């Protein structure tokens, strides 16, 4: 995607609000985030997860309902990379038209995943609010009616998705 793998992982301390905004826009435009984990053979595995939520304290959680390979992988190696990309047509059209992104187009968050645990009432409330408009459909009821366990994510750093010629004004405090 327009960046290099040698870019250092940036600190979340001064960037968390922009990180959360970027993830929220990506999740809104695609209805999921991608979570990459490490398989037993050392190879990568990517899982789309629509029920990812970030907290104020540089942590997050996701509902662990349909993530069998991801669940197996994080039990053996808890390291993950969460990626969110704003793929909204309006966002990209406007950015390409003016030759400048108005906001970061995407982000990779690095961290570790905790053990499976029952969701709290507050977490379930967030989940249900996020899928409420879709639950009137048969598929919505089938997918999101029995969500009760989550995994916490502790984030340790991030790398922005970069297209330097259109976003030199973004992520000013990130090397």
Image (spheres, helix red, strand yellow):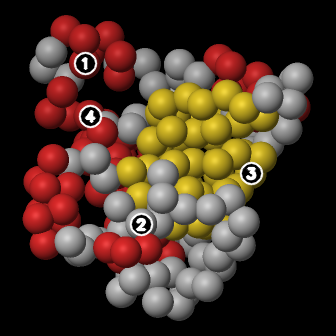
Q: Residues within 10 Å of mark 4 (few under 14, many from 20)?
A: some
Specify which label sits upstream in the sequence, 4 or 3.
3
Query: Where is the C terminus found, in terms of image quarters?
Result: bottom right
Specify which label sits upstream in the sequence, 3 or 2.
3
Tell me the residue that label 3 is attached to. Answer: 112
The reply to whether callout 3 and callout 2 are in contact (CB within 8 Å) is no
Tell me the residue that label 1 is attached to. Answer: 140
Inter-mark Cα distance, 1 to 2: 36 Å
The reply to whether callout 4 and callout 1 are in contact (CB within 8 Å) is yes
Specify which label sits upstream in the sequence, 1 or 2.
1
Specify which label sits upstream in the sequence, 2 or 4.
4
Specify which label sits upstream in the sequence, 1 or 3.
3
Q: Residue 57, image x and y in percent?
A: 57, 72
From what the image shows, is residue 29 above or below residue 64?
below
Task: Say how many tags the image has.
Answer: 4
Tell me the residue that label 2 is attached to. Answer: 163
Inter-mark Cα distance, 3 to 2: 27 Å
Quarter holding residue 4: bottom right
Residue 59 in the figure: left or right of residue 49: right
From what the image shows, is residue 25 above or below residue 29?
below
From what the image shows, is residue 48 above or below residue 99?
above
Quick check: can you spot residue 117?
Answer: yes
Residue 28 in the figure: left or right of residue 126: left
Residue 78, label in figure: none
The reply to whether callout 1 and callout 3 are in contact (CB within 8 Å) is no
Q: Is disc 3 placed on a helix, strand or loop?
A: strand
Residue 44 in the figure: left or right of residue 130: right
Inter-mark Cα distance, 1 to 3: 29 Å
Tell me the residue that label 4 is attached to. Answer: 131
């Amino acid at each position: 995607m327009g960046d290099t793998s040698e870019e250092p992982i940036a600190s979340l301390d001064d960037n968390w609000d922009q990180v959360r905004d970027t993830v929220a826009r990506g999740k809104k435009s695609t209805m999921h985030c991608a979570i990459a984990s490490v398989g037993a053979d050392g190879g990568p595995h990517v899982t789309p997860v629509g029920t990812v939520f970030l907290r104020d304290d540089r942590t997050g959680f996701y509902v662990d309902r349909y993530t069998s390979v991801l669940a197996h992988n994080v039990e053996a190696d808890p390291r993950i990379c969460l990626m969110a990309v704003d793929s909204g047509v309006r966002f990209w059209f406007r950015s390409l038209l003016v030759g400048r992104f108005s906001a970061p187009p995407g982000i990779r968050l690095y961290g570790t995943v905790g053990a499976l645990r029952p969701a709290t009432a507050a977490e379930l409330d967030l989940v249900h609010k996020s899928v409420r408009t879709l639950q009137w459909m048969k598929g919505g009821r089938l997918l999101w009616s029995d969500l009760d366990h989550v995994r916490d994510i502790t984030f340790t750093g991030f790398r922005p998705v970069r297209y330097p010629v259109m976003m030199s004004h973004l992520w000013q405090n990130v090397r």
